[in-house]
Every structure is written in structure tokens, then in C-alpha cells.
Amino acid sequence: MVFFRVYGRDLLRFFIVLYLPVVIVSLILPQGGSEDSTSGFPAVAFIFNFFYQPIYTGALIYQLARIEAGLPWTVREGFITGVRLWDKLLLVNLVSLTLTLIGLMAFIVPGLLVYARLALAEYRVVLAGDHPKDALKNSFEITRPFTLPIIACTAVLFGVYLSLQLVIEWLAASLSMTGFLPEIMNGLLSVVVMVFLTILLFRFYGLAADADLPSN
């Protein structure tokens, strides 16, 4: 919480410029992209988020590193960094997601372990300049001592997220909310959780980097 008190204004500025458009577009796209779909799955919005996610995640990682180092930064620089590394971050995400899903189908636990061991691959791409293959390999190595803490912290965060989603649904039903309001609240909640997760993993990256220093 100290981090947010000190850097809350910077994170809010970043959120408004790079994250808020994602929420707005995600609310618009499902109606245009899945109106005829019987499954109700917002395919267009999902695809948009999936392909845009590497840009704003890379930008946020860049911003966090600059903030921690006490260096100046701009949203434009972060965005350019995310765009420049988009293909590498997307490849890392695809490989990590595929391996995690395969692991989850193998009795869940292997999937959680794969998720934790590859969780810092994006940070290796942005902050260490690793090639995607090296980023995945190095993430697998440096997360070895932090596997269970990463799983536990992520589980707690998503437990809170699911609880808040239930609260939003209850409020929507109790107050007879209609239209975009519940969707906006859920969209904002999803973005806030993603920001928290990125910051959480950034702290683990710092711990892993410090733990790796003696061996270099």
C-alpha cells in the first residue's frame, strides 16, 4: 500500500492513458462482435485484449522499473517500449498460456507450477532484453525459490477478484442496475486486478534478481 500512496498519481495517469481505452473498447466490441453468437462469448473483445495486452503490460513493466530506479518516464516512452517488444511479449504469452493450459488439463497442479515458473518471462523481455526463448528459460530458473509464493499470492488476488465480482453482481441485482454500469464496474475491476498482478510479479522479479546476484 505504501507503493500506491507514493506512486498512485503516476499509476493513475498511466491507467487513464493506456488502460481506460481498453475498458471502453471492450465494452463496445462485444455488441458488435458477438451479437449473433449463441454462446455469448465476447470473441472480438477477447481477441482485442489478447493482442493489446502485451503493449500495456510491457509499458507498465517499463514504468515500474523507471519509478523504482528514480528515473523520469513518460507514458509515450512506455507505449513505444510496449509496441517495440510486442511480438516478443506476445510469443512469450502464447507459449506460457499454452503450457499452462496443458498443465491445468493434467490435474491442475502442473499448470499452476508452469504458470509460476514462467510468470517472469515478460519482465525478462522488457528489463533484461531477453529473446523469448531465453526469457522463458531464465524465468523458469529464477522463479525456482518463489514458485509457491507466486502461486499463493496470485490465488489470493484472484480470490479477492472473484469475491468482488460476486459483490458487483449482488449489487446489480439488488439495485436493479441495467445497461453498461455493471459491465463497466467489472471491466474496471479486471484492469485493477491486472495492474495489481503486474506490480506483484514485478516485486517477485526484484527478489529473484537479487537472489541471482551472487551466482553472477
Image (spheres, rainbow, N blue to C red):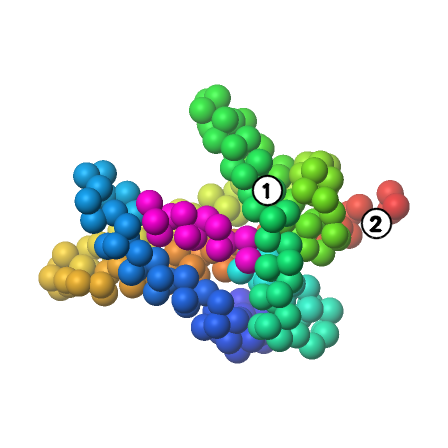
The span picked out in magenta is 43-55
* Dot label at residue 213: 2
Q: Is residue 114 above or below residue 154?
A: above
96, 144: nearer the viewer = 96
Q: Which residue is mark 1?
A: 91
87, 193: nearer the viewer = 87
* Residue 203 visible in the current orientation: no
Dot 1 alpha-carbon crowd within 10 angstroms: few under 14, some 14 to 19, many 20 or more? some
Q: Secondary structure at mark 2?
A: helix
Q: Secondary structure at mark 1?
A: helix
Quarter of image, res 64 = bottom right
Q: Earlier in the sequence, mark 1 or mark 2?
A: 1
Quarter of image, res 132 = top right
Rendered residue at 72%/74% (across/down): 71
Label 2 is placed on what type of residue?
Answer: Leu
Dot 2 alpha-carbon crowd within 10 angstroms: few under 14, some 14 to 19, many 20 or more? few
Main SS, magenta region, reads: helix
Left or right side of 137 for 182? left
Q: Is residue 133 above or below residue 176?
A: above
Q: Position of residue 9 (x, y in %)?
A: 52, 78
